[in-house]
Amino acid sequence: MIVGILGGGQLARMLALAGYPLGIRCRCYDPSPEAPAGQVSPLTAARFDDLPALRRFARDVDVLTYDWENVPVDSVRAVGKLARACPNPDALARSQDRLREKSLFRALKIPTPEFHAVESERDLAAALGRIGAPGILKTRRLGYDGKGQARIASRRMAGAAWRELGGSPLIYEQFIRFTREVSLIGMRSKTGEIAFYPLAENVHVAGMLSYTRAPYSHSALQRAAERYVGRLLRELSYVGVLAVELFECQDHLLANEIAPRVHNSGHWSIEGAVTSQFESHLRAVAGLPLGETRTLGHSAMLNLIGELPEPRELLAVPDAHLHVYGKAPRPGRKVGHVTLRAGSPEELWARLSELPAFFRREEFCLPALAPSPLSN
């Protein structure tokens, strides 16, 4: 079995590494010849709209999948007769447009913040009149890690937000004062089998994920999240791993966005679950039985953004695992992650407190990681 991955970033790299023990070989396709997945798997360097190159790539693989959700849908459809895409192009298209995504949530009766399509300043004024402020104005496409959005704290800020983002299709969303952000990773096989990982708790700094802790054990919210993600998996005839980010607001959840791929908030599963999200995704797209998602204790995943710690100091901490992505360090770039695993939330906090001084910087939010009630 050969899996072709459209995109050659760290997610493709970790997929390729997860494939080797299964006898699955991965090949990657990315516009950059320096894409980090090329260090561990064959890499085709070509543009996503270079259809002759993409067709040659598709002929040599059994199935296509993604490490990046903004692969042009038309390109995926153009090679659909050469290799099946998992998830399918319609699921990819829904995830690329925030308005279509939010409309899908509403159609499936999945609670989501109020939203309003914005094509003009008049539309923005109408959105503010209906939803009010504060709110967040976002590009409908291509925004990630806090990019492509502007917070509107009051109506006086609307003009500046429009000048910053106007000119492309936008969406205005209600600002939610949530208790915490959580994510659920679910998966569906070719035969319709569905499985879920436990909820994970996420903390962002400056729009980027700083750390994830799992499991976030809340039985009522776990059931609700599984209902919502299950509806999405079935409606989209989805095959593979799907991540959904949600806001916890007191005793209920609001869906924020979906990612049609393995997800940053699931990296803890490499050491923290019986089957990692990467192996689970490959099993699903290859037509194999889904893996077991049971956790192996409690885990925390910390993103390494911009630079790497000294490995000797980090790996002296018991149950610390370092993952380096093979990317040149630069500000704002995810260059690796660290996973810690322990038998209890208290033991996990003890492990986190043993991390070297590199992790004492404010972007890691370590004080926020103190043990809290994680069962309900």
Image (cartoon, helix red, strand yellow):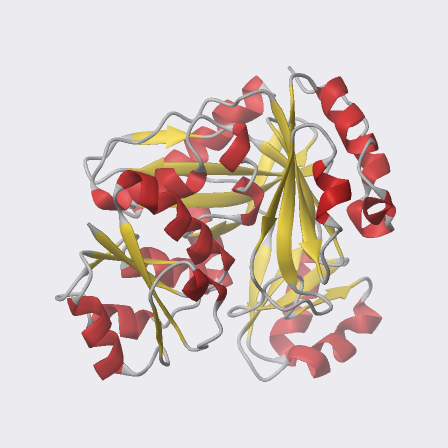
Residue 197 spot, x, y in % from top left: 47, 30
Residue at the image position 59 percent from the left and 63 percent from the top: 144
Residue 221 spot, x, y in % from top left: 56, 25
Residue 233 shows in this picture? no
343 sits to left or right of 186: right
Q: Nearer the viewer, residue 350 or 254?
A: 350
As drawn, the residue found furthest toward the left would be: 81
Residue at the image position 58 percent from the left and 84 percent from the top: 167
Specify the quadrant of the image occupied by residue 90. bottom left
Residue 82 spot, x, y in % from top left: 14, 66
Above or below for 314 versus 304: above
Specify the quadrant of the image occupied by residue 120. bottom right
Specify the quadrant of the image occupied by residue 331. bottom right
Quadrant of the frame with the C terminus:
top right
Above or below for 141 versus 297: below
326 sits to left or right of 54: right
Above or below for 253 versus 325: above
Q: Nearer the viewer, residue 350 or 159?
A: 350
Q: Nearer the viewer, residue 187 or 234?
A: 187
Residue at the image position 22 percent from the left and 36 percent from the top: 288
As drawn, the residue found furthest toward the front would be: 312
Residue 129 spot, x, y in % from top left: 69, 63
